[in-house]
Image (spheres, rainbow, N blue to C red):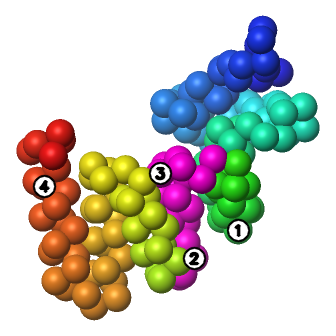
């Protein structure tokens, strides 16, 4: 179970490993990997059942759906719920935008990257990712501007 004392979310082994991108490399392709992921998803379902207003749990579930199960539509649903619960979190918009781009919703991706940058003006990855989307839309100057801004922020993150 993910809920520890005082109702705080605690990390169990599969989730910790997922977050730190270790699980795939440790047991990729094995039945142990599948078992751990399913246990993690079951724990997340249980946690969300107990605390449906936990945006973080929805976002972690979205990451697992997108990265492990290739369920990008399900991941969008999780990110939608996380955004409704915590609309001021730039990372949820960023995560949803990455999936929207993969699904071909380039304008939706741009809108979410815009929102992530509006909420967190120093979000280097959002500028870089939005630049990729702009380049794919043929907006060369927009892509250059975003990449230039990411470089400026990388050189001076307090800017």
The 10 Å Cα crowd at callout 1, few under 14, some 14 to 19, many 20 or more, is some
Asked if residue 25 shows in the view, the reply is no
First-in-chain label (2 vs 3) = 3
Give the spatial CA distance, label 4 vs label 1: 32 Å
Give coordinates of residue 44: x percent, y percent.
79, 36
Circles 1 and 2: CB atoms closer than 8 Å = yes
Give the spatial CA distance, label 1 vs label 3: 20 Å
- Residue placed under numbered mark 2 in the picture: 103
First-in-chain label (3 vs 4) = 3
Give coordinates of residue 65: x percent, y percent.
69, 53
- Residue placed under numbered mark 4 in the picture: 151
Q: Could you tell me which secondary element the residue under label 1 belongs to? A: helix
Q: Which residues are magenta?
A: 86-105
Give the spatial CA distance, label 2 vs label 3: 20 Å
First-in-chain label (1 vs 3) = 1
The 10 Å Cα crowd at callout 4, few under 14, some 14 to 19, many 20 or more, is some
Identify the residue at image location x=70%, y=48%.
Answer: 85
Identify the residue at image location x=69%, y=55%.
Answer: 84
Give the spatial CA distance, label 3 vs label 4: 20 Å
- Residue placed under numbered mark 3 in the picture: 90
- Judge from the rendering whether residue 100 lies leftward or rightward of residue 40; answer left or right: left
Q: Which mark is residue 154?
A: none
Picture layout, residue 77 above or below residue 7: below
Q: Could you tell me which secondary element the residue under label 3 belongs to? A: helix
Asked if residue 6 shows in the view, the reply is yes
| Main secondary structure along the magenta-highlighted residues | helix
Residue 126 is covered by the magenta coloring = no
| Image depth: mark 3 or mark 4 in front | 3
């Amino acid at each position: 179970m993910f809920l520890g004392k005082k109702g705080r979310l605690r990390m169990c082994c599969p989730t910790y490993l997922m977050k730190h991108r270790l699980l795939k490399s440790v047991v990729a392709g094995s039945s142990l990997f599948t078992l751990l992921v399913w246990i993690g998803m079951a724990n997340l379902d249980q946690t969300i059942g107990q605390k449906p207003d936990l945006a973080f749990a929805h976002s972690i579930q979205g990451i697992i759906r997108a990265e492990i199960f290739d369920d990008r539509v399900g991941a969008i649903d999780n990110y939608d719920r996380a955004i409704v619960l915590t609309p001021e979190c730039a990372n949820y918009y960023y995560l949803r935008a990455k999936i929207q781009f993969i699904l071909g919703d380039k304008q939706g991706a741009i809108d979410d990257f815009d929102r992530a940058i509006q909420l967190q003006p120093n979000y280097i990855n959002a500028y870089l990712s939005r630049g990729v989307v702009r380049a794919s839309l043929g907006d060369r100057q927009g892509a250059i501007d975003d990449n230039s801004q990411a470089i400026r922020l990388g050189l001076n993150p307090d800017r």
